[in-house]
Amino acid sequence: MAILCLSVENVYVSHVEDAVTFWAQPLTKIHDISNLSDSLADVCQSMNTMFGIPDLDKIYAGLFSADKCWYRCKIQYVINDDQCAVTYIDYGNSEILDRSSIVELPDDLQFPAIAQKYRLWGLQLKTRADTEQGLKFLASLIAEKQISVQQKATYKDGTVIVHVEQENLDIGEEMVTKGFAEKCRAVSSPNHAEDTAEDQESNSNQPFAWKCRKMERLPMREPKSFPMLNKCAIDQKAYDFRKEISPVENLPSVRLKNHTEKPMGDGIRIDKKMLDENKQLKSEKETLLQKIKALEERIQRSELQYKKEKVEYDETIQNMEESLKVAVGNKLKILTSKIGILKTVRHGNENVTVGDDLLEAISVVTEERISAPASMNELEENWTEYICAQEKIRSCADVVYLDELLAARNQIRQTLYSSVELYTLEVDELPLDGRQSKLQALMLSLQAAYGPSGESEGLDSVFDTFFKWKQVKNEQFNCVRSDTNNSLNVLSAWFYNIEEFFELSSDPSTSEFEVVGNIDEILDNVESVMSKELEVSLLEQKAEDWKIITNAYNRVVELIHQELTLISVIQSKYSASTEFKKNVEEWLDKDPNINHLMSIKKNIKRLKAQLRWKIVERSTLEEADECNESTLAELNNDISVLRNDIFSEISQEREEYGALSILVQKWFPELPLIYPEAGILRYMKSGGLLSDSMERDLLDAKPMKELSSKRPLVWSDVQNKQVLLKGYSVGLDTEEKVIERASKYHEAWRVQKEESGIMELIYLFFCKADPLLYLMVPFYPGESLSSLQANTFLNSKEILNVMRGVAEGLHTLHHANIIIGSLHESNVFAINRQKGIIGDLDFTKDAEQRSIVTCTCFPHLTAPELKLGLPPSESSDLYAYGCILLWLSLRKREFALTADGTPDVNDIDLDVKLKDLLSRLFCREDRIPSDQVRAHEYFQLCEETVTMLPSDEKDVVENTPADFA
């Protein structure tokens, strides 16, 4: 033990080992520990795992099991091949780690430990004391605290003997007082063996036994002087001492404190010298043993390697001997195999013909290209002037300036007519249809071969670059094939000579040496050239080659698109020119008029007067005292004929208006200004729906009091077709909006008409006496869904057909930007229980106003977002559609709701496809649009039956008008 000068140091206790031993870190190095942790976290991830025999003096890094962080450690001893006992030198704690959790550290991290091991001065563990309680008691006093230590001495293993005080409390005295430690006994104490046993027992509570624990249990308080003994006694003491310390290799020497060393005799010095020599010899012996072991392992490895190489060598020699026996056969097999592959490659190799289709396509798009007709530019200019002249006439509001504008327009029209004739003659000579078909087929074939096109680079030189590349490739292929053919011809000639030589019946013309020749060289050459051709043929194109091909392909596609666009423009102008020529030829020398329209109107007025007179006659006859039934029947027949004649004339009037509207839109915009009395613009604005000739009195109308709760409703028979006449109260502020909404609805119907899925609007006309607007629509008595379900439920097939038609109607209206806002069972009709249509709307209200009324009368059809105050939308229409579909399928209106207020279809026994459609219709965030509804797989069932729940309930809708909108 070395005696130290008394010095005081402030440290931080990091680990308590037992009741008298602990580890601490100098406060001056706390920041070094933080920096060290960062360095270890960066370095250890890339370091190698510990390999081979551990070096007990080397510093490693261990992955601490508690927090999975890296800390510096030293190996204490090896437990088995997979585990080692380590001590974390910067903290003092220990644990057992797998080898995979221990890594090497670089030289810059191989500096001394930061934590220092300390032992309380003059104390040792008490015999039969509770070591665990002693450890906990010492830890409660100093663990993880800053303390002051007064150094007394140090062991050879580095343990420092210190006196510790904490807040004026002598830690050592406190441990003795509590019975966890006792004062040290002298070295020569007879109880020394018991101390060692005690140490071993105390260490049994540690995670693993420390091999150097005996050193830590040396007496800490030595006598100030050793007694002077005789030489024999000293020799005996030295012998006993050597015998006792022989198991320990690094036992610390003992130094005396606070006294000068006294001579101990020659025997002690001799024993000390012998101990040093013995230690040196042991070290040399260990080194030699390690070298011997390393050499033995090296010899064993060399012997194993030699045996392995010898086996491989013998196998190689044997394989070579066996292969030599069949060398010729194998070589011929390889050649025949390659020849078979080469034949297949030559018949269908793409690399040989790559770009050939592009060469042909380049020729098609460059040499056969169609150019625009020479007269097309002049035609475009004349068209532009003609359109400008037409626009000036259309915007003219004063008849005074109209004649001048018409004269200028007619002159331009004559010039345009001449240009059109010339243009059509030139276009007739162009093979547009054939050229268009050829280009389209060419583009499809190129896209199938090369995929989607992009933008080409270097437009001016792309084809030249491709031509040069193709020429080089062709020369390369031709050269390789020529070499292959020549070498195969040489081989064929050799086989011919062999066949001739082996013919025993004939005399050979060549000697045996000449016949055999250099066959090995011939075979090698054939194999070489065939391999080269296969490599060239089967090798994928390089990036540079594909860039050249792709540029050429992109440019070809661009030219095809350009020419197809030009052909489309030529055809479009040709179609417009042909229509212009066909329609204007009639009006070159005359102007259109409204004489035929006025004649029809005049005839309608005449028929109306006759009808009114006949109606008066019938009324007079019916009021007479004696009514002649035959005369009355004759009058009724005359009235019916007159009504039909009037309706026929009104239909002709509509057709004439349609013809005049086309003339106004395309060729003669001046007609409404010249003939304002005809009301052409009013008719056009209503989309052909508004009629001035239709009157309510013309109809044999029968009031429908049970359905007239909201507005006047009458039904009649018009040309053997039942119609419903709805009356709407309008004012000056609402008249135009009603006409606009109705015409927009009518325009949506006209696109597909009967296939549109919505109800037809027949006529819209004003009442001459009252501020009423009448709308004539088809009448389907008893065919609304509410009426049908109240009597006889629709079956699954009928539901599918009807709701498919309603989905088509939703798509028609939504495509025209019309929000229904009033989709309910009284406004959906099942014509003949097979075809579903959506009824007309209340055109005096907008979508939001219609939605408010519907929410009041049909709350179960109201979407959650409408209840929150949001405006109606296509999505809310689809929600109502889903509720109607669910109602038809379940045959009842009451069903379970989810938390957000939408119907819960999860627990309902319905067809899987129907359930999927309903769930998407009720989805609040991403509701399915109308175009996807009509294409849903549920409507592909056709002949299949949709599962429906049996129900005896019949929902009767009371006091709900069939035309409710």
Image (cartoon, rainbow, N blue to C red):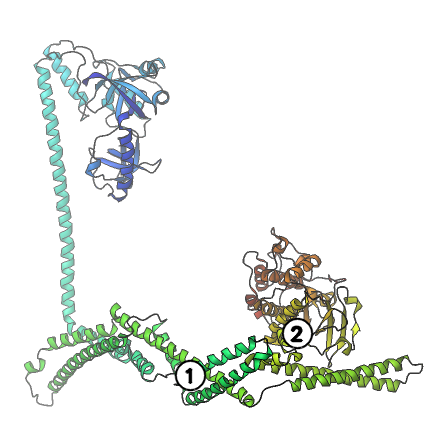
- Element marked by disc 2: loop
Please identify the quarter of the rendering in which residue 218 is found.
Answer: top left
Q: Position of residue 344 (x, y in %)?
A: 27, 78
Q: Position of residue 854 (x, y in %)?
A: 68, 60
Where is mark 2, residue-wise?
760
Please identify the quarter of the rendering in which residue 443 is found.
Answer: bottom left
Question: What residue do we see at 12% from left, 85% from top?
Answer: 497
Query: For the residue carrying disc 2, how many other residues have a C-alpha within 10 Å: few (<14), some (14-19), or many (20+)?
Result: many
Which of the marked residues, 2 or 1, is nearer the chain's N terminus?
Answer: 1
Question: What residue do we see at 53% from left, 77% from top?
Answer: 392
**Nearer to the camera, 703 or 338:** 703
Disc assigned to residue 378: 1
**Nearer to the camera, 474 or 594:** 594
Question: What residue do we see at 59% from left, 62% from top?
Answer: 874
Residue 542 can be seen, yes or no:
no
Q: Which residue lies furthest to the front in this view?
A: 400
